[in-house]
Amino acid sequence: MKIAIISGTSIERADTFAGWREHRLETLHGEILVKEQGNLVAMNRHGFEHALPPHAINYRANVEALCQLGVTSVVTLSSVGSVREEIPPGSLVSCEDYMSFAPKTFVDDRMSAFAPVIGNPHLDGIAACTELPIVRGKVYMQTRGPRFETRAEVRAIQVLGGDVVGMTFANEADLILERGLELTPFCMVDNFAHGVRSSELSMEAFQALVAKNQDTINQFLADVVDYLSDCS
């Protein structure tokens, strides 16, 4: 089984992927650079060479590249804000579902539809291989970015049943699931969303919180690679 690990800029700061072979692919939607080792593929959703903001990521090219490589299962790690006081920054979250009001698709020329379902096939195995606690069964809410959410938007997300909010995962989830790949998503809570516990957000404060969680992310990614390397 060929398995992909998708993360953001944290994947470049993790020593786990140092020395992996670089592989450049040309897809119908653009050129993508990934890293490979054994049965694993590592992808920076923003790009290893020129980091793109969330709303400008070439999600189609990313997922198409994985399909070209023969990937059948994907594990993702995304930075999120928590809209729930009981899920504080520093929490590692597993999502069982997601919401997006601007779905992504590969289909432009015909009628097509499917019902997305997150299977989480690697959740139990990864949880057993890491000492990090995982908060399970949560719902991810997608916003467009690159700005943070307004307080009113965060209140709406709470009412709709969202637990964490981010700018990337639902876009790639739509495409991954549309192509029939397995999906096991994780989220790192880097901040409380705007207005939760009267939280004020700035890019500088957010980056400081991300840096604070890097050691946890490094450990988690190392554990994920150890587990997935044994999958065949």
Image: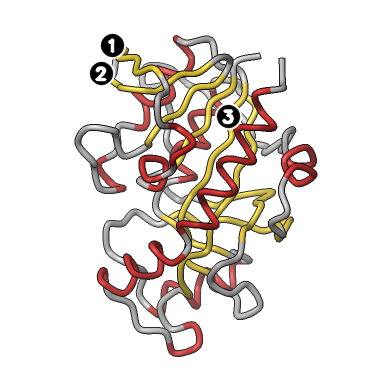
Query: Which of the numbered marks, if any, corresponds to residue 74?
Result: 3
**In front of the other: 151 or 39:** 39
Q: Secondary structure at mark 2?
A: strand
> Which quadrant would residue 180 be assigned to in this image?
top right
**Residue 137, percent from left and from top:** 73, 56
**Residue 143, percent from left and from top:** 40, 57
Whether 211 is drawn above or below 45: the answer is: below
**In front of the other: 39 or 87:** 39
Q: Residue at x 71, y 48 (%)?
A: 130
Whether 108 is drawn above or below 207: the answer is: above
Answer with left or right where residue 177 lies relative to residue 232.
left
Which quadrant does the N terminus fall into? Answer: top right
- Is disc 3 surrounded by few (<14), some (14 to 19) or many (20+) residues within 10 Å? many
- Is disc 2 surrounded by few (<14), some (14 to 19) or many (20+) residues within 10 Å? few
Q: Secondary structure at mark 1?
A: strand
The residue labelled by disc 2 is 31
- Distance (Cα) linking label 3 and label 1: 20 Å
Amino acid type, label 1? Glu
Q: Earlier in the sequence, mark 1 or mark 2?
A: 1
Q: Are marks 3 and 2 in contact (CB under 8 Å)?
A: no
Q: Residue at x 45, y 51 (%)?
A: 101
The residue labelled by disc 1 is 26
Q: Secondary structure at mark 3?
A: strand
Colouring style:
secondary structure
**Residue 227, percent from left and from top:** 69, 32
Extreme residue in the bottom direction: 198
Q: Are marks 1 and 2 in contact (CB under 8 Å)?
A: yes
